[in-house]
Amino acid sequence: MNSQLLILATLVSIVYGGHYGPSSMFAWKQLEFGFPNQMAEEEAENSGNLIPTNAIPIDVEPFYDVSTDSRVAIKNQSEAYTTSSLAEDSQVNKCNQMWVIDSGVQGSKYVCPPKLLLIDLYSNQVIHQYEFDDSLYIKDASLFATVALNVKDPPPAGNCQNTMVYVADVGFHGLVVYNYQENRAWRIENRFMYPNPDNGLLTVACKSFVLMDGILSLKSFVKLGERNSPCPVSAIDSSNNVYCVTLDPIRLIKWDVRKPYHKQYIEEFSVEHKELEFVSGIKYTEASSGRKEFWMISNRFQVF
């Protein structure tokens, strides 16, 4: 791992039409993983199952405890929940449950089939899991890294049982759809899921690299045109404002989707560029007080 790697979890607060600038909440040079004791950690390192310098987070998931309105940033998703492999991405629903995709991959090798895990955030217990069969992934090629939810029965009337889970295969141009209520899944492939070579060369902080991933994020969209610099991920708030961070130049921008996509309608935040190098995860959340927040994680992927 390059010694320049710095992992930052950054918060942008928006309060009743105004906003505060982004501020870094957490920072790591190297991730720390949770183990029941020191011996278990040493055994994992000695066996090669844990190589701390090889770990890089790609997403962040904020969670509010509604009973106390306290904020919990899930900084290390793999701390309490994984088996022997890697939890790639997560999504929290309004039932205070977190869906996690376990890629089943260590390094570049599959050590177990991929699986979806459903975790109750109050008890920190896995309450459901679904293991992918051979029809859902291509061994030694697939890499599942993005989860999106469509909850059709949210509270207070529902209990989040009627949920569709979408999992992007960033490594092998596919999408897995899981019906939680029926406990079944299927795979979709399409030529539009392949990487676009015209967008494969990226530049971040004056460093260029090739990233030929397939589906990196999942959002409903209408194509309006082309940007000079891509946003790897984006999020939308309850007022229909889209937020994202462009790669080159590094800019945190906001756009109201009800207005034309033109520079006069795009607002730019004042940011410290070094804190937003390659933002790979961005999530929107709202506290019961009405405070709107965006959480972002940047990992300087270009130097990893």
Image (spheres, helix red, strand yellow):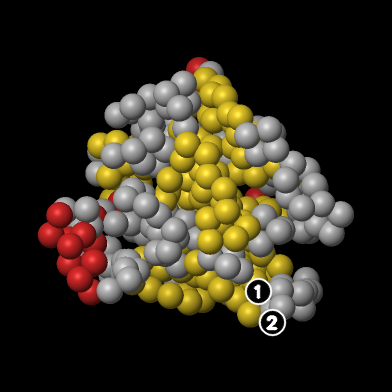
Determine the residue located farthest toward the left in the rendered image: 46
The residue that mark 1 highlights is 65
The picture quadrant where one finds residue 156 is bottom right
**Dot 2 amino acid type:** Thr
What is the secondary structure assignment of the residue under circle 2?
loop
| Tags 1 and 2 touching, CB below 8 Å | yes
Please state which amino acid type lies under the numbered disc 1.
Asp
Give the image location of residue 26, x and y in percent. Answer: 43, 75
Q: How many marks?
A: 2
Image quarter of the N terminus:
bottom left
> What residue sits 47% from the left and 75% below the top?
24
Give the residue at x 27% y 63%.
5
For the point 56% across and 73% down, the residue is 72
What residue sits right under mark 2 in the picture? Answer: 68
**Image: 284 above or below 118:** below
Label 2 CA crowd tier, 10 Å (few <14, some 14–19, many 20+): few
Q: How dense is the environment of label 1, judged by Cα within 10 Å: few (below 14), some, or many (20 and up)?
A: some
